[in-house]
Image (cartoon, helix red, strand yellow):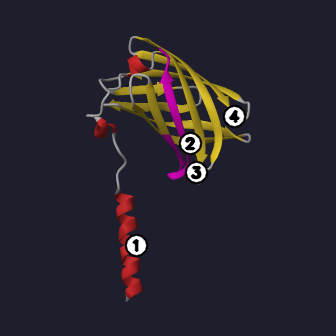
Amino acid sequence: MHIMKLLATLAFTLLLGACASAPEPASYAAEKPALELQDYFNGTLDAWGMFQDRSGKVVKRFTVLMKCRWDGDVGTFEEDFSYSDGTKDRRVWTLRKTGKNTYIGTAGDVVGEAIGNTAGNAFNLKYVLALPVDGTVYHMTMDDWMFLVDGRVMLNRTSMSKFGVGLGSVTLSFTKRP
């Protein structure tokens, strides 16, 4: 009987965990300083980051030089990556403001469009990334969260999954040049 109660409690706990909802940008609406994407992502930024696999092991470290500019409601972010293994990569994002707090983004290795929302100090961008690994391209679901710390520093955490299974995460720290 004791084992049955233990199993029932475990099943109930797992069920509650499965019902937990992911945070939404609106959860951060009151957080300060308020993030204005056109202000923060305008000019040159430096970033330092790492990719961790699902066990938490750091697989790659990298730096990013970003050059950002806006023409009205359309932003262009040129990202030049330098990895710890000596490889380099480049991604160019185009981000279009579609509403007060909403954005649509595209990049050469993004499948379809990225959907972005801001509130308070937070920016959430969801997209599918075509990621080449050992000669095969995998379509990875990315859930990207950025939080403005102050006028110069932003922290970024991205979870990566495939078929709903978490495969790893990317952590970045951005610093805006004066």
Can you tell which of label 2 and label 3 is closer to the viewer? 3
For the residues labelled 3 and 1, the Cα–Cα distance comes to 25 Å
- Report x, y in % for residue 132: 67, 38
Q: Residues within 10 Å of mark 2 (few under 14, many from 20)?
A: many
Label 2 belongs to which residue? 140
Closer-to-camera residue (128/160): 160
Query: As rendered, which of 88 and 165 lies closer to the eye?
Result: 88
Q: Please, is residue 46 above or below residue 136 in the view?
A: above
Secondary structure of residue under mark 2: strand
Residue in the image at 59% along x and 38% along y: 50
Which residue type carries mark 1? Leu
Q: Is residue 164 magenta?
A: yes
What residue sits right under mark 4 in the picture? Answer: 84
Q: Which residues are magenta?
A: 158-178
Mark 3: which amino acid? Gly
Name the residue beneath numbered marker 3: 56
Which of disc 1 and disc 4 is earlier in sequence? Answer: 1
